[in-house]
Each structure stands twice: as C-alpha cells, then as structure tokens.
Image: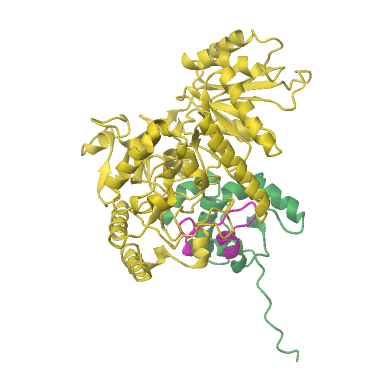
Amino acid sequence: MSWSGLTAIVAAAGLGAAVPDAWGGDLAEDGALVFARACVVCHAPGTPSTAMLQDRYKDSVPALLEERTDMTPEYVRSVVRSWRPRMPAFRPTEVSDEELAALAAYLTRNNRPRSPPDVTRQ
Amino acid sequence: MSEKDFSAALREFAQVVGSDWVLSSEQDLDGYCDEFGPYRGTPQEVIPGAAVAPDDTRAVQEIVRIANQYRVPLWVISGGRNYGYGGAAPRLAGSVVLDLKRMNRILEVNEQHAYALVEPGVSSMDLYNHIQAKGYKLWMDGPSPGWASIVGSTLERALGHGLLPERWNYQCGMEVVLPDGDLIRTGMGAIPGSQTWQQYKWGFGPYVDGLFSQSNLGIVTKLGTWLMPEPPATLFGIVTAPRQEDLITLIDTIRPLRLSGILTSAGFARIDPQGDGGATGRGGARATVSIYGPEKVIGAHWDQVQEICAVIPGVRFDVERYAAPYDTAPMSDLNKRRHCVMSMAERKSWDHGFMYLSHLVPFDGKAAWKMMQVFDGIYQQHGLRFRGGFSTGNSSRALMCSQRGGFVRKGDAEFNRKSMDLVRRVTVDGGRQGYGVYRITTVFMDEAMAAFDFNDGALRRFHETLKDALDPNGILAAGKSGIWPEYLRGSKS
C-alpha cells in the first residue's frame, strides 16, 4: 500500500490534525500514519489495551503510547516484532521495516534529547 | 527435497518478489507460528522453513510455478491471524509460508450494488475504515477482532455478529491461482468485462467457489463480498426464561420465526449457569435476537417474537432499539458488534491460548439439549462442565454450538495435554454421535475430517481425487482440512 493510501484512514481515525512537529522530521510524520493504520485501533483512548497499560503502569508513564517520552527506537521495534502478553507480533508484511522505523521515530519524537557529556569535568 | 533445491527455490522466489520479501531469519519465522496453540514452544511445534510475500497475482503464479519445479511445500495465509485455529503456522514442518498480506488493495466498493472486491491482505478494519472515510451508507460484518483478513475469514467460513453473520454466504466471485500456476475467475468473472462478477454467484456450469473454502486446492487472490445498505433501525431483544430446560422451548419457538424470514440475522441461545429462576432477571435460559430494518417492520417482528414466546411460563423480554443515524461510540462492545462496527474490542486474553470448538446440531430444542448432555458427559470426565451456547446465522438452518473448552496455558505441558485430550474426545466422540465441526484448529483437522466418513470415507477420497488432479506435486497447504497430497498420505493421515 502506498503512503497516500493511508491518508483516508488517518482522516477516519481523526488524527489528521494531531500530527506533531516532527522531532524526527518527515519520518515521524510518516510514522503517525503507520500508527493510525496499525496501532490506534488498540492504543486509542478508552480501548482495553490502553486500560491495561494504565493498570500496569499506574501513573509512572502515560498509558497512551503517543504521549510517552521514554521509549527508544529499539524498544519499539522489539515490541512490534515479538509476541507479548496481550499483543501479537507484527510481521514485516504487516508493518514493514521501513514503516517500523517511521513508527519508532513517531513514538520517540517527544523524547528529550540526551545532554552531551560534560567534557570539562575530568 | 534437498537443502540445495530449497535454497535454489528461495533464490528464485527472491527474483520474483525481491530479496526483502523472502523471509528466513529466526525472528521473521517467529511471526509464522501458532502462538496460541498447544504446541507452542514444545518439540511438537511446527516451524516453517521460510516465508515469501508477493505483491500481486502474477507474482503468486510465478511462486507457485517455482514451488512445483523444486517440490517446495507452500502454506498460504491471507492475514495470518487465524487465532484459535492454527494461526499462521503450517501443518507440514519446513513449508514456505506464502504470506499474502502485502496484497492489500481494496479494488472496488460499489455503494449502489453494495459489494466490495478485495485482495487477501485487506482486513475487516481496513475495509470498515475505508467505508467510513468515504461516507458510504454500507454495513459489513465479520468476526472479531477486526484485524482478520476478509478473504481469509470468508474462506474459513468464519461468523460475524450482526446483519450478515455468515460471511461465506455473502461471498460472490473470486480469482484463484491454481496449484499449477494457472489463473481462473469464478462465476460471472470468467466472462471478460462482466459487470456481474460480484452480483451473481453461480455463473454457468459447476459452481466451484466452495472448492477453495477451508481447502488447499487453490490460492484466492481476489474475493467479492456483499455488503448491506445501512438499515434505518435496529432492535436487539433478549428473551429470558426461568429454567435451564426452557432452552428447548426457546429454540423451538424461535425456529419458525427463523424459517419464515422474520429473524434473519445473528441470534444466540444459551443456558445461564447462574440462573436464579428469574428472581433478578437472570434466567435459566436466554435467547438474543437481532432485527434490522424499517422501524415499523422490526417492531412488528419483535411483537411476533413476544407473542410466540409468551407460551413459556415466567418468560420476560428486554429490548434495546436504535435508529439511524447511529451514535456507536458510547455503545457497549456487544452492541457495536451488532451494529457491524469493526473493532479490536473483543479479544480473548492473549496471555495464554485457546482451541475453538464449534459443532453443528439441528435447529431443534431437544436435539440441542441432548447435545449439551453428551458433551457435558465428556467434559465431566475431564473434571470440567460444559459451557457454551447456540448461535444461528441468517443462512444456516442448523444451530452452531460453540463451547468454552480447549484452553491453552503457555508453558504448562500437562494442562495442555489434558486440554488436547478434551478437544480430541469432543471431536472424535462427537463425530461418532453425528456431531460434526464447522471449523477446527490445524492440530485436529485429521480427526475432524475422520468424522465425515459416510461410505467408508468417500468424501475424503473425493477431496483426495481433486487434490491429486489439481496438485499432483502436492505443493499447496498439505494437510489443510485433513487433505494430504499423495506422497504424504500414508504417513500423515
């Protein structure tokens, strides 16, 4: 499916206006489309999956994945590709490696950049 | 098949689909397992050798020709989420999974004639979202959750929950790659330029679509499915009776309504184990009916249901009514399904696993009651009690008994062994008493098919005759529905 084919699905999911300024640039915007197609059905507000995450994390991290600021691209890739309790693995034919990279960029777009090491301290 | 031939086949697959879409790493193959099956993580687990993912029908044909050349066994998946029935895993270890998920085009949605033509990778959610985005006043139905492939779930004859529950009944026309790589279109689609491919099922001559359902005689690459215009109103009625034995009367009183066309959509009947004789409204037996159409018409139908069921002492009626435009957002998950809203809301616990069990019984109260007693006897021998209910789609004149058995616990071999014993006993002993399954996990397909043994297994022999003629090299989905290619027949079946 081409990227343009995802547009209608984004509109239906009501995410058209919610794509943030891309910390990752265009890749994160593309990742928003991937999220809308493959993830939002389970990870939208009010879904059983979001409720499960709320119960698991309490308030230590947001239950909504799009509000997380602590995930890494490696973690996102690992979760998507492996079987987890309550979440199946997504094959490359469902979320391609390219789409997964974009999704990881989107879900980590709000991460605070790490401070560079203080080289003045010896 | 030698390793040399297998490797050569994979190289040729890569020339067709690109090397990115020939998948063989350990992580890749982990996606083609039966995650919720009883053998997951055990030595008995069936592991594929690789996967190949084409993007179009031409590529599927090429892959099939290569598979024939090297005798590579293929196992076909559309969406690969056949949970409770085998998932994406093959029956024959080392098979190459032909993953059709990349073929995910919605080829047509025709609002005037209420149908869609889709490729195998299109899920129910995909089509539902597309219909919503376009603003079509069309409803579709399907199994939950909504990530199931429309093609896959239709070919499996899976059931929905609302207006068009028997999805197979609404299939109209398909395109199929045969095991030798040839390509056919069924029904009116065999006429080039036909405008009725998705409007008239039968075509001319033998009706062949059923050969590709729950089968390994061809690879469906396009499938037509009927949708329905949005109904002006909906009504969901619950008929509750105080005694569990009232189930017999409930079924028998609903049957004429079903036969006359007053009740046409999904309905369910079950006993309530916690029944208290109706004191708090929770009865010993309960039937739910879904009625769709103009408000006056469905109101009259519900009046008819109440009039006929009034013969049951202590019966009570509850009803919910809705009218277009439907605000489904605040509805319960059950009512969303009844309004044909595709969602992921209905998911079993994914911590462990399950093997679905569903048998057919006549639409007759005493027959249904007897079936429950028979199966309850088997469950009790396993320290359990029968829990289940009876459902009816709008084309079947039988009841389908879906049971809550066949649970799987990850990592608990002893529990899973007992669970498999239960499923095997219900399948085999149920078969001996005339109860066949409508669908079953790959683990028990041979046992399920063995029950269909009229005339010393004539139906199985017929399947095998077709298999040998269409797939002489036995490359396609070996073992699906108990149909094995000739070279494996002695050792596997």
Q: Which residues are magenta?
A: A77-98
In the rendered image, residue B249, in percent from the top left (x then y), is placed at 61, 14
The answer to whether B79 is drawn above or below residue B305 in the figure is below
Quarter of the N terminus of chain B within the rendering: bottom left
Q: Residue at x 61, y 44 (%)?
A: B421
In the rendered image, residue B141, in percent from the top left (x then y), is placed at 49, 34
In the rendered image, residue B374, in percent from the top left (x then y), is placed at 61, 28
The answer to whether B248 is drawn above or below residue B80 in the figure is above
Q: Colour of chain A?
A: green
Q: Describe the colour scheme in one phrase.
A: by chain
Based on the picture, tell me whether residue B283 belongs to the magenta stretch: no
Q: Residue at x 47, y 29 (%)?
A: B164
Q: Nearer the viewer, residue B425 or B345?
A: B425
The chain coloured yellow is B
Q: Residue at x 59, y 18 (%)?
A: B366
Q: Horizontally, is B439 left or right of B381 in the view?
A: left
Q: Nearer the viewer, residue A13 or B335?
A: B335
Q: Is residue B116 visible?
A: no
Based on the picture, tell me whether residue A89 belongs to the magenta stretch: yes
The answer to whether B118 is drawn above or below residue B188 in the figure is below
Q: Main secondary structure of the magenta part?
A: loop
